[in-house]
Image: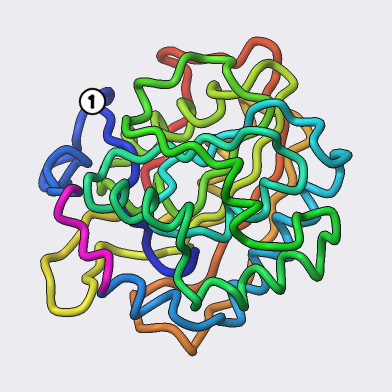
Amino acid sequence: MTGPPAGGPPGDSGSGSSGSRRNREADWHAWPVDDYLAENYRQLHPVDRGVIAHHSAFYRQFPPGTLARTLEFGAGPNLYPLMLAAGAGRRIDALEPSDANVAYLRAQLTDPDASWEPFYAVCRGLDPGLPERLTEALARVHVVHGDARSVAPGTYDAASMNFVAESVTEDAAEFRDLCVLFIRSVRPGGRLVAAFMENMPSYRIGTGPRWPAIPVDEDIVRAVFAPHTEGLRITRLGKDRTLPEYGDSGVVLLRAARTPDPPDGPNAPDVSP
């Protein structure tokens, strides 16, 4: 996915900063799917190729079909993370709270838009273990209409999150809490892959309302994930000038594994930007 996400999972923990909008204050069920796709996904952008290459390398470390269950945490209407997971995963749960995004995802599983075919060609070029046809890959996907709190800790072998936690809230504590819920969705030792918009403020899609977001960078992402993970690897992609101007400075990419006993509580890191 490029640009801001569509309807990341809501959360109620943490305390909001003065003037900061939290996830529940935006109407994610009214997410403008068509406008968002038109701005970001009707053609393949350079940053898409960069994220796909990073995530493909993550999934290729596992032999085909060896991950029993994987999770896409706040899937939105973006299909290429789901395509990539099909190389290693036997079942892919696309967790999504937005009614609009759930309707789009369910329709796409059996009749995907032709605009996704170039994305799948890039995915399959990097991972020949993917099924020959896009519909075969998407047949492994199950759309789960729910939010982050509905995921039992330790459920998944691997999880992916793309442009969600930083793009659904203006509150630093809520950003951190969403990331921790993402981490804990996998079993101890389970693997994580993620992408974040770098330094992106709250944003608009088309001429619609402003959606909440919080600027994050490599240091903030590391501060949130390091106490809960091992083998943490963070890289970045530069800003993609072919996309609409959302105010970001690029993309932060992450790979890690969940530690057996992630710490939490009052000593959690302060990630206020």
Q: Among all residues in the image, which is located at the extreme bottom?
A: 242
Please state which of residues 214 and 196 is positioned toward the viewer in this rendering. 196
Q: Residue at x 47, y 40 (%)?
A: 94
Task: Identify residue type, mark 1.
Answer: Asp
Q: Residue at x 14, y 48 (%)?
A: 26
Relative image position of residue 189 (x, y in whole percent): 74, 21
Dot 1 alpha-carbon crowd within 10 angstroms: few under 14, some 14 to 19, many 20 or more: few
Taking 13 as reference, is 16 above or below it?
Answer: below
> Quadrant of the rendered structure where residue 9 is?
top left
Residue assigned mark 1:
12
Which scheme is used to colour this image of the protein? rainbow
User: Which residues fall within the magenta stretch?
Assistant: 29-34
Is residue 59 toward the left or the right of residue 147 in the image? right
SS state under label 1: loop
Question: How many numbered badges does the structure rendering display?
Answer: 1
Please state which of residues 236 and 41 is positioned toward the viewer in this rendering. 41
Relative image position of residue 70 (x, y in whole percent): 62, 33
Residue 1 sits inside the magenta stretch: no
Q: Residue at x 70, y 73 (%)?
A: 121
Q: Residue at x 23, y 54 (%)?
A: 212
Taking 254 as reference, is 62 above or below it?
Answer: above
Is residue 86 toward the left or the right of residue 14 in the image? right
Taking 41 as reference, is 253 above or below it?
Answer: above
Relative image position of residue 180 (x, y in whole percent): 48, 27
Relative image position of residue 203 (x, y in whole percent): 25, 67
Majority secondary structure in the magenta region: helix
> Quadrant of the rendered structure where residue 129 is?
bottom right
Residue 31 sits inside the magenta stretch: yes
Is residue 75 toward the left or the right of residue 98 in the image? right
